[in-house]
Image (cartoon, grey):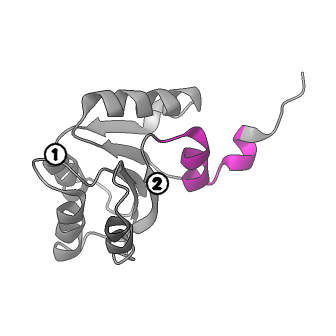
Amino acid sequence: MYKEIYLVDDEELINTVHALMFRKLGLEDRLRTFTNPELALDCIRFRENPEEHILLFLDINMPEMTGFEFLEFMYLEKIPATIDVVIVSSSIDEKDNKKAATYTKYVRGYVNKPLGSSEITKFLGIEQAISSPTSS
């Protein structure tokens, strides 16, 4: 399981909508949201335990730094492969999907905005636990 879950999107509204999805799944205590990708990258760079796993939902088109530039920094700085990245984008350009697939060390998927609970649970590996009915 992931120690933390990062939402990195320059639009506060998108982060809020996505955070609500995590709250419904009872995961808000692990969630960190960033509208500035440079701050998210700093948190990854300077974390206490680089072996702890983080799931990072990353937007591509951001003004300070694109999602692809973010990934380039991760490669250049040899960030441990304990960071799993899911690209979350409104882009329908197939080139973006293909480019994301070239970052195999980190990228685990590419989904369209907005995130849905099925995508979240898929990447967290808790799909069956969330979707199975409970008996009272």
Secondary-structure class at tag 1: helix
Q: What amino acid type should be assigned to the residue bearing mark 1?
A: Leu
Residue 104 % position (x, y): 39, 77
Residue 117 colored in magenta in the image: yes
Relative depth, front residue between 60 and 6: 60
Q: Nearer the viewer, mark 2 or mark 1?
A: 2
Name the residue furthest top: 136
Residue 25 % position (x, y): 59, 32
What range is drawn magenta here? 115-130
- Splitting the image into 4 quarters, where does residue 60 fall? bottom left
Residue 116 % position (x, y): 54, 40
Secondary-structure class at tag 2: strand
Q: What amino acid type should be assigned to the residue bearing mark 2?
A: Val
Q: With respect to residue 76, does 58 lie above or below?
A: above
Q: Residue at x 22, y 51 (%)?
A: 61
Residue 135 % position (x, y): 90, 27
Structural crowding at the residue carrying mark 2, measured as other residues with C-alpha within 10 Å and reported as few (<14), some (14–19) or many (≥20): some
Residue at the spot of label 2: 111
Residue 128 colored in magenta in the image: yes
Q: With respect to residue 53, does 76 lie above or below?
A: below
Structural crowding at the residue carrying mark 1, measured as other residues with C-alpha within 10 Å and reported as few (<14), some (14–19) or many (≥20): few
Q: Residue at x 34, y 42 (%)?
A: 7
Relative depth, front residue between 134 and 114: 114
Residue 116: mark in rendering: none
Q: Residue at x 51, y 27 (%)?
A: 23
Q: Quadrant of the C terminus?
A: top right
- Splitting the image into 4 quarters, where does residue 132 fall? top right
Q: With respect to residue 23, does 84 lie above or below?
A: below
Label 2 and label 1: CA atoms lie apart by 23 Å
Residue at the spot of label 1: 39
Q: Residue at x 41, y 28 (%)?
A: 17
Q: Earlier in the sequence, mark 2 or mark 1?
A: 1
